[in-house]
Every structure is written in structure tokens, then in C-alpha cells.
Amino acid sequence: MISIVVPVYNEQESLAVLHQEILAEMETVGMQFEVVFVDDGSTDGSWQVIAELAGKYASVKGIRFRRNFGKAAALSAGFSHAKGDPVLTMDADLQDDPAEISRFLDTLAYGHDVVSGWKRKRYDPWHKVFPSRIFNFLVSWLTGVKLHDHNCGMKCYRAEVFREVRLYGELHRFIPVLAAARGFRVGEIEINHRKRKFGRSKYGVRRFLKGFLDLLTVKFLTGFGQRPQHMLGGIGLFSFLMGLIGMLYLTVTWFIRLYDPEAFRPLHERPLLLYSLGAVLLGGQMMSIGFLAELITAYMSRETESYSIAERTEPRAENEIVT
């Protein structure tokens, strides 16, 4: 069975149409399915539509938040209530085409654990498309996960991915990156993108600033999540050594000035003294933060594993005869 998770925020007009399109596609696929609609604090009649669909179709589940918690929270709730494997996500605004579901399943069957959609031809305004392309380039460059469209809401996952990847904040757009860091295989297919028929986009310019900050967080988590001192301590050690070199140089010039007062200016008149002191203090603080981060990581590692197991062999019974 496949679970289709759809986060919803003020998409009243689109839900019934989307559900009918999903029904038509799943009849073609010939696979058991469920649709999990997660109402992320909608203020229109979206929940009423979801409740009506759930009352009419056994394959529809509805989850309603008390307020708007964000897309990552909506996806997490949908994943935790999904019973199927694989799990497909798509937006509720009808811009994602349910007719692509079969292609996602085919690509997943070729050995991928995550398949991300790529909206090569987009029907969004330029002020959304251009920054998105820059953002996708930065994500691919910094993380090494080469996808054309990290922001695409239509993705397909094996259920085991969500036993190891946890979402919080606004990290939903980085699920392929987080999955790849755990060793899961990530693929991409080009999909059909459609014009918006109802409502308006829920994302503004602020999401790009938030996205860049989240990108730095993901880079730190995937690169140094289990060894934070390697980054924080490395920066701190470099700063401390630069400050120490500056202090040693000033010490030498102070001794020289004892014998030749005209050789150098007094220490209190030299900016290098402030820079060196600042570098030493910054270096010490960064290394101290690194040690604290290591303590937290060591404590948290008791509950979460730092590795990902793909398969296990079953032990053979002692009386089993091998032929």
C-alpha cells in the first residue's frame, strides 16, 4: 500500500478536485492506497472538505492542527500516521500532477530510497523562480546532493527513511539531503508542473532568507552532527593561534621598545593588541562551545544511532541442513 501525504493550508477549492485526480491515477496503478490530508491550521473551509471526503471514502484520513505549525510539522504528522510503504508527498494546490505517481513508483523500484520531483518548466512568477534556482544551486554545491529542485513538494520515499530522518523547524525541503547523509540513495525525475487554479501562494520572499539559514543548519548537521568539535574547535583553534601569534609579536616589540623607545609605538596605541586579545578570547569561547556540543552529542547518541543499517542476515538454525 502507498500512503499519499498532502499538507493543506487554505486550499478549500482544490481538495475535492485533487482527490478525484488521485483516485483516477490509483485506479490505473492498481495498488492499495490511502490519502492523509493534514490541515495545518487552515482558516477557510478546508477541514470541512477533508471531513466530508473522509466520511465518504475509507481511503482518506484527516488530521487537523489547532493552529498553523508549518509544513515540516504537517509532513511529520502525516508520516507518523501513514500506514503504507512507500510514502508520497504532494502539495494541495493542484500544481503537482497526480498522474506522475506511477512514474515515482517505477523510479523507486529501480533501487532508490528517495525520488524527488524536478519542475523543469515552472508556472510561477520570475521573482520566485530565479531565487529558487540560486537556492537549489547552493544546496547542491554545499551538500553534494545534486538535485535540480530541492524545493519540489512532490517526492516519494521508502517508509524506512522516516525511521531515521526527523523533521523540525522548516527542514522539510532538505529531506533528500538528510536522507543521503544517512546513506539512502536519492534520485530525481522530471515532472509536470501546472498553473495554480485557486488561491494564492503561501510563500513569500522571507522563505529564501529562512531557507539559507536552514541550509547552514543542514550543512552543519550532515557534516559535523556527530563531531561538532571538529568544526567549532577548528575555528576556535585557528582564532586562538592567530591571536597568540599577534600577542607574541607584540611581546617582542615591547622588549625592543625598552631599549629603543622610538622603534615602535606604545602597546596601548596599537590596534593589533585589541585584535589579538579578541582572537584569543573568541578562540577560547569557540573551543569551549565545541566541548559542550560534544558532551550533548555523546549524551544524545545513547538514544539515536550514528549509523544506518541497510540489511541484516538471519542466523541459520543449528539443525538446519545446507544443501
Image: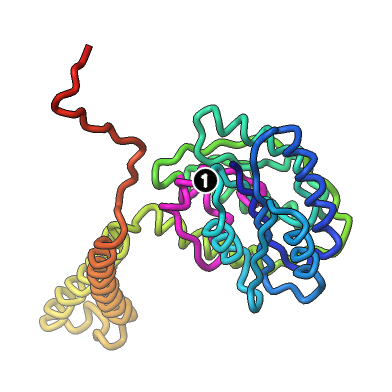
Above or below residue 2? Residue 278 is below
Q: Secondary structure at mark 1?
A: helix
Quadrant (top left/top right/bottom left/bottom right) for the N terminus: top right
Above or below residue 97? Residue 35 is below
Nearest the eye: 275 or 179: 179
Q: Farthest bottom residue?
A: 268
The residue pinned by badge 1 equals 141
| Residue at the spot 65% in from the left edge and 36% down from the top edge | 31
276 vs 57, left or right, is left
Nearest the eye: 135 or 184: 184
| Residue at the spot 75% in from the left edge and 43% down from the top edge | 98
Quadrant (top left/top right/bottom left/bottom right) for the C terminus: top left
Image quarter for residue 292? bottom left
Q: Position of residue 4 (x, y in %)?
A: 65, 49
Q: Farthest front residue?
A: 319
Q: Farthest top residue?
A: 323
Answer whether residue 97 is magenta in the image: no
| Residue at the spot 83% in from the left edge and 56% down from the top edge | 16
| Residue at the spot 73% in from the left edge and 67% down from the top edge | 9
User: What span is in magenta?
Assistant: 150-179
Mark 1: few/some/many CA within 10 Å (<14, 14-19, 20+): few
Colouring scheme applied when the structure was drawn: rainbow
- Residue 48 visible in the snapshot: yes
Q: Position of residue 146 (x, y in %)?
A: 54, 40
